Amino acid sequence: MNLLLAGLDHTTAPVEIRERLAFNSADIPAALMQLTSGSDGRAPLFREAVLLSTCNRVEIYGVIADGSTADAVVDFLASFHGLERHDFASSLYFVRGEAVVQHLCATAAGLRSLVLGEAQIQGQVRLAYEQAKEIGSAGTTLSHLFRQALSAGKRVRHETPLGCGAASVSQAGVELARQRFGELKGHSVLLIGGGEVSELAAQNLLANGADRLTIVNRTLARGRELAERYHAEAIGFEQLPDALGCADIVISSTAAPVPIIYREHIADALAAHNARGAWPSMLLIDLAVPRDIAPECGQLPGVHLCTVDDLQEVVSHTIAQRHSVVDVADAIVTEEADYFLAWLRSLDAMPMLTSLRQRAEALRSAELARALRMLPALSAEQQTVLEGFSRSLVNKLLHTPTVRVRDAAEHGDGQRYAAMLRDLFNLEATT
């Protein structure tokens, strides 16, 4: 099987490395074209490729091209991101063959997420597939694989309680704020960003009693839309420095490629806290990858800075509660993976079945033409009946052998049956 997965996630690499390997949405088409078409005189690495990049993982799924190696994927990542191999190579994992299928199905089901059972990953997997499909890098094999993985994720969420409740980094971030401040009511919360993570955070803040919520977004209209839904105030991005000076809690999740908050911003905010007689302290929760808040901010007295990697302790209790249903979810994932593998194995016999049907059709057409020459007095209606009879006879003769060969192929015996067809009928495989 020529499937390969190369990637890293929150279990193998800290956010400092993940953010350097992350692909923003605008870069993904170019990366996929390079992987499947080659560049700078290099041969393509994959015949098909899909790139999944989230805050907790960067993964490349591919159908290997001839001569491709895992080393070549490392070279691609280093070249594309302008890094040295030693900067990240030890954090990568490589998965091959059938294990790739199980890995992706488990990922879509939220079984490999920081927050076990998180719902967001389903949409992220779907988006990765749709991006690849749009530019043509997801062919027959990966299209089937990703559809099967999405089916696995959907079934796990519908058939188990794994995804019940708020299961996301947004929920974990809000829980962290609640643990630190106790009641959120009366505390000023600044939410930066207008995407799905920010919206989930707003929902959870409201559910946990937050009543002083301000939303900052580069697109003010989007910020106002969220503010209206969640009883918040919306302000423009240019007002961010002033808003920091009024905030007790900052939760940031944007798609910015570089930090938007630096040490001097937080130092000024603390001074503003002090000037208005408030305790000069802040909780900064950075849910973005690449990070929105420069690490140096956490060195200031009174500032507690958390990234997505710091949420593990917060979600440990939730994980313990959900492990009781993981075995059921794993069984669903294995079943969906087996469906895909059966389909993939069935392809072993398809070229020979196609060749057999083509041979039968050629013989049917030749014999029908010979019969019609011998019966020139037949009417058009009679000729049509004879044509239908010949097609029906061939289809019925081939039906049972076709079903049996496909069934054998799904159980891993396709190559042997294909060889038997080739020998019995003197066939050549079609591509």
Image (tube, grey):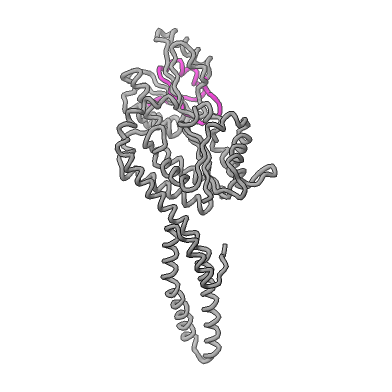
Residue sitting farthest toward the right: 41
Q: Is residue 30 magenta?
A: no
Side of 224 relative to 262 (left or right): left
In this picture, is 423 found above or below 1?
below
Q: Residue at x 55, y 72 (%)?
A: 426
Image coordinates of residue 394 in percent, x first then y, are 46, 76
In this picture, is 50 found above or below 371?
above
Q: Residue at x 38, y 19 (%)?
A: 188
Image coordinates of residue 380 in percent, x first then y, are 50, 85
Q: Residue at x 50, y 18 (%)?
A: 241
| Res 122 visible | no
In this picture, is 252 found above or below 59?
above
Q: In the rendered image, which quarter is residue 162 located in?
A: top left
Image coordinates of residue 275 in percent, x first then y, are 44, 7
Q: Residue at x 52, y 26 (%)?
A: 16
Q: Is residue 256 magenta?
A: yes
Quarter of the image with the C terminus is bottom right
Q: Which residues are magenta?
A: 232-261
Q: In the rendered image, which quarter is residue 321 located in?
A: top left
